[in-house]
Image (cartoon, rainbow, N blue to C red):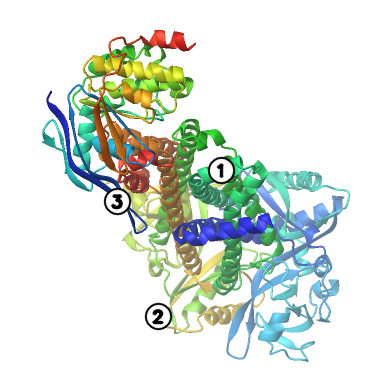
Amino acid sequence: MSALIELKDITKTFLTEEIETRAINSINITINKGEYLSLSGQSGCGKSTLLSLLGLLDASTSGTYHINGVDVSSLTRDQRAKIRSEQIGFVFQSFNLISDLTIFENVMLPLTYQSGLSKQVITDKVNDVLAKVEMSHRKDHYPSQLSGGQQQRVAVARALVNDPTIILADEPTGNLDSKNAQAVLALFDKLHQDGATICMVTHDPVSAKRASRCLEMFDGRLIADNANIPSHRNSVPSLEAVELAAS
Amino acid sequence: MSVLIDIKYSLRLLFKAPKFTAMTLSVLVGGLSISLFTFSFLYSTLYKELPLPGGATALALTTETIGISMNMDPNQNLLSAYEFRQIAKTQSSLIEFGLYESRDARLSFEDTGKNIPTTYVDSGFFKFSRTQPIMGRTIQQEDMIVGATPVVVISYETWQNELSANEDVLNMSIRLNEMLTTVIGVMPQGYHFPGVAKIWLPLNQSQLNTKQNTSSYFTAYARLKDDISNEQATKNLSAVLDQLYQQSVELYNQPEAKKVIHLRSYPMEQVNGIGNTAFIFLNAVAWSILALGCINVGNLLLARSIERQKETAIRAALGASSKRLISQLMWEGVIITIVGAILSILLVGAALDYTEIMLHSWMPNSIVFWWHWGMDKETLAMAIVVTLVTIALSAFLPAWRSAHQDINTTLRDGTRGAQSKKAGRLSRLLVTIQVFLVAFLMLIGALSGYVSQSFINLEIGDDYSDTMRVTINLPINKYKTPQEQAQLFETLLDRIKSDSSVIDAHATTFNHFPITLSEFDYDDSRERQSIDTFTVIGDTEFSGIKLVAGRHFNRRDKIGARKVVLISQSMANRYWPGESALEKNITIEVEGKDESLYIVGVVSNRMNPRSIFGKLDSEDETYISGLQFINPRQRIYYKTIKGSVKTEGIFYRALFEIDRNIELAQTVQPAERNRNIMRDSMRLTSKVIFGTGLFSLMLALVGIYGLTANSVAQRTHEIGIRRAVGATDKNIINMFIKQGGRQLITGLGLALLLFALISAVFHEFSVGLIPVYLYFVLASAVVICLSLIVMLAIYAPTRKAVVMEPSSALRYE
């Protein structure tokens, strides 16, 4: 497998009222294309900060970061934004859909920040991903009209719409009930089967075990990096099946 | 106890954010001060009762001739002695009814003298004002009889300032209009009824017993019977007056019109009855500015409460009731509003005191005695009302809104949905209203500013520097024939010119007569054009009206000689382009009779009363000889050598040598006095407009900044999401600018639409004072200026928000 992402000696320090807090301490990770990583650890260990650095939502204090062999650790804000819009897909715990936009518009959002895409291309892409997450029938609704599980599926669709190099998910099932959590995890499994690279932050050991590789953090450091072969890898249930089973 | 804790907490928050506190306070103080000052100034000017016993029921009775312009009938607001007598005989609506006339008298000392505002009154005048003299007596019936000893009642101030507070003032003789007059009474301090009078002289009975066609005109005072309403009395009295006027239309060829009576309080009469309109319009402007201030302050406080939304939600979760939360959130606004109100009251008090001093020193004999501006109980009561309204708008509403949030929504992480949607809509609406109000104020301000500047720089086309002016009325029972009247005016002008300080003098009147040009065809259906016509005795050269061709009038242009006319250059060019207008014939209808005149001279153009809004040559003027068309009322002008002193006395000496009984309709004063007062008042207006416009603009800047900052703060999380999915700084800024642009276009569009309507009406009324393109220039200037300000106010907080890292924005609460 080829190295998609390479972090070397990444450190992130926060300065608050003269107190220096080292959230990430000399982390080295290599993520290969098509890997499904889970990142777990106790609260405050730095998982979300690491995910922010991976997603270029924040800049590291020191260290180097390469995506597809390109050093992205010293890019400008706008260059980082360009990479986010073209190569990274985010799924958040709190969905982070924009309430004033319809489902279709929310999903379309990353594409509107790319240049040179025709309206038809954008519409087709959005319709494709909405179909993929089985939310086409709700595309004209607003987020407040959807359940939590449905909102998260829309968030996944938004993460997929730009054909990202990597999908970064920050506790994507944290705000969902077990039925919806299962549905979202099943969706991730399916995406992984289709070849997507996923990095998911999770508290839940069961969710973590669905990933092909489990990273564990403690106090800003990476303390475990284990390959994981879940038992159900070859029998991914459909979304309908999960929903029916849960009801 | 809990209230004290809340106050303490709010004070701590205010001190912790001194910039916010100062900005909010300054916006509030500005808005409150403008609205309070406007209210207080107008209320004191228009609605305060006469400070006399029974002042509330004292009415001024004036007339209006509907269908005749003021130019054609300068006495049209007055009641003739004949009309008075006839109405007094038949009326049953009034318990008191009398006449007076206000004009200056000349108080002379050994070698100097001064004009004193004087009212000539009948014997019921002082009883009507329910005021007794502090010394001596008032004017009685016997003082009005022809041949009675001349007597005068003086004001306390005249006694103190002009007669050195002489203890033996009663029966003292003073020279008034060169006549020894006995002081018979002194009125109390501050009494100057009916306006600015400093002395009171008796009306002469002979003036009151005149015939219908030779009657003098007066102002009337009246008091209604208890069971009669103002409307009923007005209707009854108008019916009688109009009947009398219709008689004079038939008998004396008066122009056809309808004559009505107005019964108004003295303060309202002082502003010609337009007080209510002025009060409503100016207060509406002031309240709009206060509304802007309230929107801004309310929004700034709302932004603060949104910052503390989580804190409020925690308090609510811990059991705080809505009432308790509102109370706690309100205190910040209440403290700011109360401090702002106190500062405003102090500021307005000082401004009113300054206004009182400035206006009394600027126009010492024009400010009526009941006009006093200062902090009073009405202004304080209005301050309380305005403060309560401001608290409701600026403190209660934001607190109420914030206290009624969904606790779950706020406490749950990351679901800012419904709240921000409503808030965003409200914020956009507020920005649109702000833009509309500010744009409208700026557009009207720019238009008014331009009009003010036009007046200040008005080119009249004449030159009255070092010139004195006086208006006299010849008693037509003494000077019966036009020849006698012409003789007197010629003699008077000769006497004036004989003074070594005088360069030249002339007498003139102004009329507006229809003319016919003999060489042009007139369709019957087309009315003959009316042209401003001046009668002139002497020549106009010294007042800047230069001779362009032909000759001036001379002493041979008198009754019996060929009737001649001078015309303005604009008229010559208009009707006889490329040829000489001299010896052409025109017909002017003078007082209903067609007069054929020959043009003997062409003079330079001037701006006359009819074309005051127009260009210098947009209206024509004709000049006819005052010795051929004699008028017993003349305005005398005389130009003196630069630097001459005591120039007023030149006229009085000349007049009193000829006839001491001739009335002055207006006393001697610099010919440019009114223009200078007008220019000064326009300068002041211009400054006030500029200041108000600037303040409105500042309010807009602060307000829109606050609203945008609030909106951006509410959407920080959304910014984080957009940034997370790839939006650049430019994308985010463009998004806010685009949204602001929509509100800007809506607000500006509405304001421009209203401005266009007002401009169309104003353009029609002002006869092209402002060229059409200038309306577009003014509108464009306001659009550019406001757009820049709005864009700046949107850009600054947006720029601040996009600097935040997306990871921080996503965690933002």
2 or 1: mark nearer the eye: 1
Check disc 2 and give the amino acid type.
Lys
Counting labels gives 3
Q: Judge whether B756 appears above or below B324 on screen.
A: above
Could you tell me which residue is drawn at 77 percent across and 91 percent down? B167
Could you tell me which residue is drawn at 35 percent across and 62 percent down? B551
> Which of the marked residues, 3 or 1, is nearer the chain's N terminus?
1
Q: Judge whether B338 appears above or below A9 on screen.
A: below
3 or 1: mark nearer the eye: 1
Q: Report the residue marked by disc 1.
A: B314
Q: Are dots 2 and 1 in contact, CB under 8 Å?
A: no
Q: Secondary structure at mark 1?
A: helix
Please state the horizontal and vertical placement of residue B384, each as a whole percent of the image.
67, 57
Q: Residues within 10 Å of mark 2 (few under 14, many from 20)?
A: few
Q: Is residue B275 left or right of residue A173?
A: right
Mark 1 falls within which chain? B
Mark 3 falls within which chain? B
Q: Residues within 10 Å of mark 1 (few under 14, many from 20)?
A: some
Check disc 3 and give the amino acid type.
Ser
Q: Which of the 4 image quarters holds residue B66?
A: top right
Q: Report the residue marked by disc 3.
A: B580
Q: Is residue B493 left or right of residue B697?
A: right
Please state the horizontal and vertical placement of residue B472, each as a whole percent of the image.
59, 68
Check disc 1 and give the amino acid type.
Ile
Mark 2 falls within which chain? B
The CA distance from mark 3 to mark 1 is 94 Å
Residue B642 - label? 2
> Which of the marked residues, 2 or 3, is nearer the chain's N terminus?
3
Nearest the eye: B34 or B96:
B34
Nearest the eye: B581 or A80:
A80
2 or 3: mark nearer the eye: 2
